[in-house]
Image (cartoon, rainbow, N blue to C red):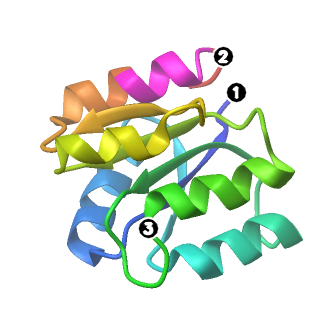
């Protein structure tokens, strides 16, 4: 059973690249470039599928990944979250938030394996 992944990254090229990698691996991926808008859509149930995993970048305008996860946790405390960042020191901002943190660059095979580990019952 393929489950939906919400991918949030303000960099359209990186978002499209990760979306393509995950789609080719059999995942249904919804890409969002604006974390605040994605949070509103998520909380209002405006996505075309039931989201089972959130992948977010750390550095984004308006709202960084840590702020996004804090707000997400208020309504979805058990949602699996993968944070991808080029800043090693950013990991400290996610302490106690129950996220999986990975540094960029995350090679395609590692991205797929990480997503599969977070969603073992799909694809």
Tell which tag, 3 or 1, sits nearer the viewer: 3
In percent of width and height, residue 60 lies at: 36, 73
Q: Which mark is residue 23?
A: none
Label 1 crowding class (10 Å Cα cut-off): few <14, some 14-19, many 20+? few
Q: Quadrant of residue 40?
A: bottom right
- Residue nearest the viewer, comparing 5 with 57: 57
Q: Which mark is residue 121?
A: 2
Q: Which residue is mark 1?
A: 1
Label 2 crowding class (10 Å Cα cut-off): few <14, some 14-19, many 20+? few
Q: Which residue is mark 3?
A: 64
Q: Is residue 59 above or below residue 76?
A: below
Asked if residue 23 is among those painted magenta in the image, a careful observer would answer no
The mark nearer the N terminus, 2 or 1, is 1
Tell which tag, 2 or 1, sits nearer the viewer: 2
Q: Are marks 2 and 1 in contact (CB under 8 Å)?
A: yes
* Secondary element type, mark 3: loop
Magenta stretch in the rendered image: 114-120
């Amino acid at each position: 059973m393929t489950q939906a992944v919400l991918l949030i990254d303000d960099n359209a090229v990186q978002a499209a690249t990760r979306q393509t990698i995950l789609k080719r691996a059999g995942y249904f991926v919804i890409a969002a470039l604006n974390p605040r808008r994605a949070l509103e859509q998520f909380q209002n149930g405006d996505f075309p599928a039931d989201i089972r995993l959130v992948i977010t970048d750390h550095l984004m305008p308006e709202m960084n990944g840590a702020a996004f996860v804090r707000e997400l946790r208020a309504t979805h405390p058990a949602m699996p979250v993968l944070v991808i960042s080029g800043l090693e020191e950013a990991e400290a901002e996610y302490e106690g938030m129950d996220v999986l943190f990975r540094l960029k660059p995350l090679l395609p095979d590692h991205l797929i394996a990480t997503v599969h580990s977070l969603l073992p019952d799909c694809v």
